[in-house]
Image (cartoon, grey):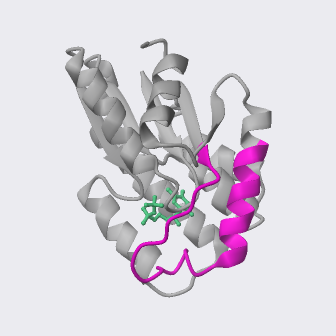
């Protein structure tokens, strides 16, 4: 299973990846957890450009996220899925659909087309969007400073849930982490 976690910055995604990983490992499954942008050497370099580099055109931003994702799919995600591991990703292409497609106004369809090309049409099996919570830690990076982008992304996630109801579930992220984790396990049929 390929499960992705989405939400605006500080929505608690990383905690949920760790809780689900622990549960799956307890049940004896191999788990590969990864994060975007990053997760490969190339991706970490691209991450620095995106978060701490100069301003760039919206399509340049979308293309850099897509480049990091293309590498992550080839190096880590596909090999793991092929040997039967669970893959849990802290963000995947729905981030680009929400942030670049809606937040930057490039259009969900155009950004989806780019992402299907660069991932070889690798769709997540299930996607959990954690909504409602926002914790800001440390100094904001280039993307966190873009308030309209963050607001657009929140609206974008709602749009994605409506468009892909069988895959994307929006969860109330203001609850205690254990409660959210329980709902995720139930939705994955692990309870
Ligand atoms: P990061 O520090 O990883 O944030 P978080 O811990 O919230 O995941 O920064 C990732 C930032 O990049 C975040 O603001 C969302 C943004 N982003 C996009 O705009 N498009 C994308 O495709 C991805 C993966 C992230």
Residue 79, horizontal then vertical, whole percent: 28, 29
Q: Nearer the viewer, residue 128 or 182?
A: 182
27 over 60 or under it: above or below: above
Residue 66, horizontal then vertical, whole percent: 51, 55
Residue 25, horizontal then vertical, whole percent: 22, 23
Task: Quarter of the image for the C terminus: give it.
Answer: top left
Which residue, as the protein is rendered here, is positioned at the far bottom? 54
Q: Quadrant of residue 133?
A: bottom right
Q: Quadrant of residue 116?
A: top right
Using residue 25 as the reference point, say whether residue 43 is left or right of it: right
User: For residue 155: magenta?
Assistant: yes
Q: Nearer the viewer, residue 133 or 59?
A: 133
Using residue 25 as the reference point, say whether residue 55 is left or right of it: right
The residue range painted magenta reads 130-159
Count of numbered badges drawn on the protein: 0
User: For residue 88: magenta?
Assistant: no
87 over 172 or under it: above or below: above
Q: Residue at x 51, y 31 (%)?
A: 122
Task: Quarter of the image for the N terminus: give it.
Answer: top left
Q: Residue at x 37, y 46 (%)?
A: 15
Using residue 23 as the reference point, say whether residue 65 is left or right of it: right
Residue 75, horizontal then vertical, whole percent: 28, 42
Using residue 86 as the reference point, say whether residue 139 is left or right of it: right
106 over 139 or under it: above or below: above
Q: Residue at x 31, y 40 (%)?
A: 18
């Amino acid at each position: 299973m390929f499960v992705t976690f989405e939400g605006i910055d500080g929505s608690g995604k990383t905690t949920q990846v760790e809780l689900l990983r622990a549960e799956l490992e307890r049940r004896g499954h191999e788990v590969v957890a990864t994060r975007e942008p990053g997760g490969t050497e190339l991706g970490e370099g691209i991450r620095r450009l995106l978060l701490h580099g100069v301003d760039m055109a919206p399509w340049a931003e979308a293309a850099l996220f897509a480049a990091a994702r293309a590498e992550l799919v080839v190096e880590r995600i596909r090999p793991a899925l092929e040997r039967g591991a669970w893959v849990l990703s802290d963000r995947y292409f729905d981030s680009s659909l929400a942030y670049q497609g809606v937040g930057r106004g490039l259009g969900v369809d155009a950004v989806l087309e780019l992402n299907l090309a660069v991932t070889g049409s690798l769709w997540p099996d299930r996607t959990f969007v954690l909504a409602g919570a926002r914790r800001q830690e440390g100094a904001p990076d280039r993307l966190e400073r873009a308030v309209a982008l963050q607001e657009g992304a929140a609206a974008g996630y709602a749009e994605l849930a409506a468009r892909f109801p069988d895959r994307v579930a929006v969860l109330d992220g203001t609850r205690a982490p254990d409660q959210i984790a329980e709902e995720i396990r139930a939705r994955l049929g692990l309870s």
